[in-house]
């Protein structure tokens, strides 16, 4: 389910967050699906449970997961307003990234190609 790259310079909790988000985006997990407990995931990945707890706390703050006391953690259903605000946030992030690429003299077509290839890969995986 989740594999970490110990050579990746990002903190482990960020890698965990990104992997869970990726599972949601790819449809590997559905809203209200139960995810592994902090202890179970820590044992599976052989890392400190506090690292998992931090990732889960951040994911919950972002509305990606929710917890039910005594039951565990679950994938959160996305409501329309949440999706729209996340989309706007991501578009602003993309805009800043494109501005940085322009600053670095990246050809426009190269940026467009990356976006088109990403869409093609997503469509092919459906």
Image (tube, grey):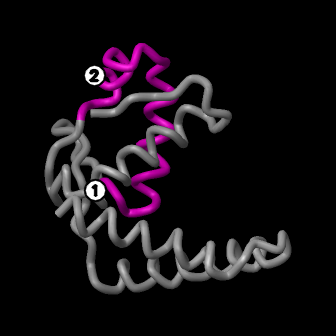
Q: Position of residue 126 (x, y in %)?
A: 17, 63
CB contact under 8 Å: marks 2 and 1: no
* Prevailing secondary structure of the magenta residues: helix
What's the residue at 36%, 52% (across, down)?
Answer: 22
Q: Position of residue 84 (x, y in %)?
A: 39, 85
Q: Position of residue 78 (x, y in %)?
A: 27, 71
Residue 121 numbered tag: none
What's the residue at 46%, 28% (across, down)?
Answer: 4
Q: Nearer the viewer, residue 114 or 26?
A: 114
Q: State the count of labels.
A: 2
**In the image, is 117 to the left or to the right of 44?**
right
State whether residue 70 is above or below residue 61: above
Please tell me which of labels 2 and 1 falls first in the chain. Answer: 1
The segment highlighted magenta reads 36-65
- The local secondary structure at tag 2 comes to helix
Q: Residues within 10 Å of mark 2 (few under 14, many from 20)?
A: few
Q: Nearer the viewer, residue 95 or 66?
A: 95
**In the image, is 120 to the left or to the right of 55?**
left
Label 2: which residue?
Answer: 40
Q: Residues within 10 Å of mark 1 (few under 14, many from 20)?
A: some
What's the residue at 42%, 66% (across, down)?
Answer: 118
State whether residue 95 is above or below residue 44: below
Residue 116 found in image quarter: bottom left
- The local secondary structure at tag 1 comes to helix
What's the residue at 29%, 54% (across, down)?
Answer: 66
**In the image, is 65 to the left or to the right of 12?**
left
Label 1: which residue?
Answer: 24
Q: Nearer the viewer, residue 76 or 67?
A: 76
Q: Quadrant of the N terminus?
A: top left
19 is within the stretch colored magenta: no
Label 2 to label 1, Cα distance in Å? 19 Å
State whether residue 38 is above or below residue 89: above
């Amino acid at each position: 389910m989740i594999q970490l790259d110990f050579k990746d310079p990002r903190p482990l909790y960020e890698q965990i967050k990104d992997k869970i988000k990726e599972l949601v985006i790819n449809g590997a997990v559905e809203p209200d699906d139960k995810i592994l407990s902090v202890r179970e995931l820590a044992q599976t990945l052989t890392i400190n449970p506090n690292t998992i707890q931090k990732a889960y706390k951040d994911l919950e703050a972002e509305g990606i997961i929710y917890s039910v006391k005594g039951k565990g953690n679950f994938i959160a259903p996305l409501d329309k307003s949440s999706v729209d605000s996340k989309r706007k946030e991501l578009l602003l992030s993309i805009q800043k990234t494109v501005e940085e690429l322009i600053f670095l003299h990246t050809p426009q077509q190269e940026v467009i190609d990356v976006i088109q290839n990403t869409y093609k890969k997503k469509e092919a995986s459906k």
